[in-house]
Image (tube, rainbow, N blue to C red):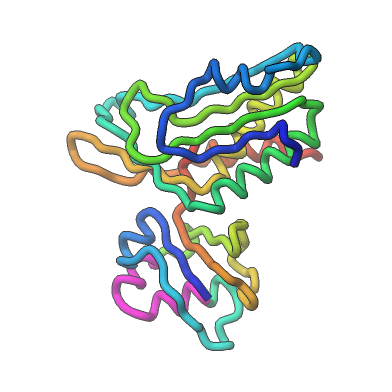
């Protein structure tokens, strides 16, 4: 993997502008930067959510995201990409995950960002616990995340 | 081999990791789940729906019919909810 790929799993919040700047610094060949950030919401299906707690598999989380990043770098003409996933307790309104992709032209940046999020949602070893007024429980995986990842398989 | 548990699998088993040496007759991930489920009620509860359990060997996802011989670390966990 080249130095243009940044993958971090961390408790602290990230600064989106800083991460975009890091990808584009000292380069004038980048024509497109796409960023996606996933944010903790304050409700799910009408129930209030007080906080999420993200558990992860240290070592495998970075390795799995790294594999997706390698696939994205070989499949699209990107100059670089960054994936940051937070862990620990996260309150509504706070950032959970960031994907930034950079390329000469926008199609690669858009598609790679969506690919990375779809694959991350289906395959990255993180698990969410939700705190609600009724109690704390593990979030169930959703089938449509697996379906979203499957649509990127080339025929 | 080291065995790790995550999320509600960890909660039900009651520990995050342990080192076990299953007998040679335990050859696949499926076999290992069946062997673990027999250890006590906590394990049985954790693995009562084997088809819901996901596995990884040495930090890579594996299918339930994968062989476990030579694995350094095997992890069991529910379907993932990251991102």
Q: Position of residue A23 (x, y in %)?
A: 66, 22
Which stretch did the figure color magenta?
B32-48
Residue A116 versus residue A83: which sits nearer the camera? A83
Horizontal placement of A112 versus A61: left or right?
right
Horizontal placement of B81 versus B68: left or right?
left
Magenta segment includes B46: yes
Horizontal placement of B55 versus A76: left or right?
left
Q: Is residue A146 above or below residue A33?
A: below
Q: Is residue A105 above or below residue A10?
A: above
* Residue at the (38%, 80%) spot, across then down: B38
Magenta segment includes B67: no
Q: Position of residue B8 (x, y in %)?
A: 35, 56
* Residue at the (18%, 34%) spot, across then down: A133
| Quarter holding residue A108 | top right
Quadrant for the C terminus of chain A in the image: top right
| Quarter holding residue B55 | bottom right
Q: Position of residue A18 (x, y in %)?
A: 55, 19
Dominant secondary structure (helix, strand or loop) of the stretch shown in magenta = helix
* Residue at the (32%, 78%) spot, across then down: B40
């Amino acid at each position: 993997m080249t130095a243009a790929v940044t993958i971090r799993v961390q408790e602290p919040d990230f600064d989106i502008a800083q991460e975009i700047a890091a990808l584009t610094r000292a380069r004038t060949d980048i024509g497109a930067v796409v960023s996606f950030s996933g944010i903790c919401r304050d409700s799910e299906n009408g129930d209030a959510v007080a906080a999420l707690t993200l558990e992860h598999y240290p070592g495998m989380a970075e390795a799995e995201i790294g594999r997706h990043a390698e696939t994205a770098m070989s499949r699209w003409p990107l100059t670089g990409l960054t994936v940051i996933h937070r862990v620990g307790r996260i309150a509504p309104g706070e950032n959970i995950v960031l994907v930034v992709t950079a390329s000469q032209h926008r199609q690669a940046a858009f598609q790679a960002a969506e690919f990375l999020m779809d694959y991350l949602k289906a395959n990255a070893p993180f698990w969410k616990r939700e705190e609600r007024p009724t109690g704390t429980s593990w979030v169930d995986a959703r089938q449509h995340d697996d379906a979203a990842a499957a649509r990127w398989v080339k025929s | 081999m080291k065995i790790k548990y995550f999320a509600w699998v960890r909660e039900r088993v009651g520990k995050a990791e342990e080192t076990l040496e299953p007998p040679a007759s335990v050859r696949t991930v499926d076999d290992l789940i069946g062997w673990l489920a027999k250890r006590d009620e906590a394990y049985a509860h954790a693995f009562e729906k084997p088809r819901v359990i996901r596995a990884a060997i040495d930090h890579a996802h594996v299918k339930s019919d994968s062989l476990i011989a030579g694995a350094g670390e095997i992890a069991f966990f529910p379907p993932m909810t990251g991102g």
